[in-house]
Amino acid sequence: MKLVSGAPRRAVAACTLAAVFWGMLGGAATPARAGTVEVLHWWTAGGEAKSVAELRRMLQSQGHVLKDFTVPGGGGDSAIAALKERVRSGNPPGAAQLKGPAIGEYGRMGVLANLDDIAVRQSWDSQLPGVVANVMKYQGHYVAVPVNVHRVNMMWVNAEALRRVNARPPQTWEDFFRVADRLQRAGIVPVAHGGQPWQELLLFENVALGVGGADFFRRAFVDLDPATLNGPVMERVLTTFRRIKPYTDRGSVGRDWNKATAMVMKGEAAVQFMGDWAKGEFRAAGQAPGKEFLCVPTPGTERAYIFNIDSFALFQLKDPNAMVAQNAFVSTVMTPAFQEIFNLNKGSIPAVTGGDRQGFDRCSQESSAHFVAASLMKTAVPSVASGMVQNSEMEGVMKQIVADFWNDDRVSAEATMGRFAALSKKK
């Protein structure tokens, strides 16, 4: 892969700093060039849209313009198709919202920009946990910038439902099934489930981490090791996963995740297994963590962390002014100010470590501390269900395998393990 040389970026940075310096001294230096950075993203509503508006304002204060990449008809698939066409024609946007496997795909095409100079200037290696930095690199070079970290292995609990059955949040799966029995006898749906393939894969990976641990998780879903995928631990994972189904309600099929969250908020159900983006639903309803709802790791995963990272990949540009704006965009995204604003709005945590977390609620503060600890203990793993591990084709196959097992009791664990093990041949 031919990456953009760092020299032009260093020259741009030097000119910018010189202009600022002479401006402070009252000199007549030529101001830094203004430019436009075109950005493909999905953040068009709610707190996410507020964050984009703030990023736009931050860039405007530096003399730059953030231009949204828009695609008629909307939809992620249409936008990605348009992105590929733009890249093939040699006219890419400055940045695009992409995740791990997709970053690597464009890296192999040789079209991503080298961000190493900016990374050195802002000390990314010391600011980002290794598991985050690795996702942002291609062949050892930074080519993307992270905006947040979501925790996927979360259990959202209606506090009053647990009080009614005199129970505490379960810390193991066996504890969970005992509490679920008590909830069911009390007439409360134990688990609010959204019966969609991606939600079933998300629940499955939560069970896999809780039953098998981080090393098992990596061997199974990252390495696609056939012995692990077809071994005794996987059988325990599948057995545990299937035991959860009787604690869901009949209306779960096809249910959107936010509607399942509403069931917990209203006390119609006790628990939902969902990433920390669910917190926004509780907060929008005026509920507070530790009062109306509890946010705790899923059983068996307190010392581990399934992460989902939103990030922007940066593309090689020809226009010098656009490159200046692109550099400003990258640098601004990595500032503590933007990281705090964005994640307070979105319910996630900053990708950078060491910042002030006083403005964040209890859920986010605990998530941040757990992420740092899990990163150090090597128990932080990427989310399969969130597109952080395999390409879209492989992820789709895994969703189907899990959905078939969940929705049809006639499908055996043995047959499912065989289908998983066959994935290793498709790597």
Image (cartoon, rainbow, N blue to C red):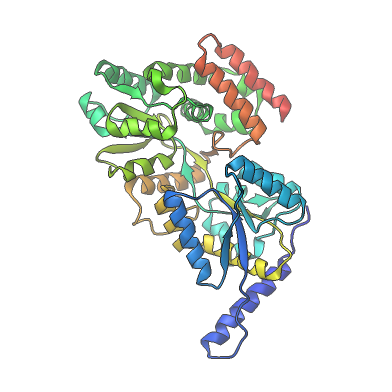
Tell which of 344 and 41 is nearer to you. 41
Q: Position of residue 59 (x, y in %)?
A: 53, 67
Q: Position of residue 307 (x, y in %)?
A: 51, 41
Q: Is residue 170 visible?
A: no
**Residue at 57% across / 66% down in the picture?**
65
Q: Is residue 332 visible?
A: yes
The mark total stands at 0
Classify residue 139 as left or right of residue 195.
right
Tell which of 359 and 81 is nearer to you. 81
Q: Position of residue 354 (x, y in %)?
A: 44, 57
Q: Answer above or below: position of 350 versus 417.
A: below
**Residue at 26% across / 33% down in the picture?**
159
Q: Position of residue 305 (x, y in %)?
A: 47, 39
Tell which of 257 and 15 is nearer to you. 257
Residue reaching furthest to the top: 410
Q: Answer above or below: position of 15 versus 417.
A: below
**Residue at 61% across / 51% down in the picture?**
136
Q: Quadrant of residue 283?
A: top left
**Residue at 63% across / 42% down in the picture?**
78
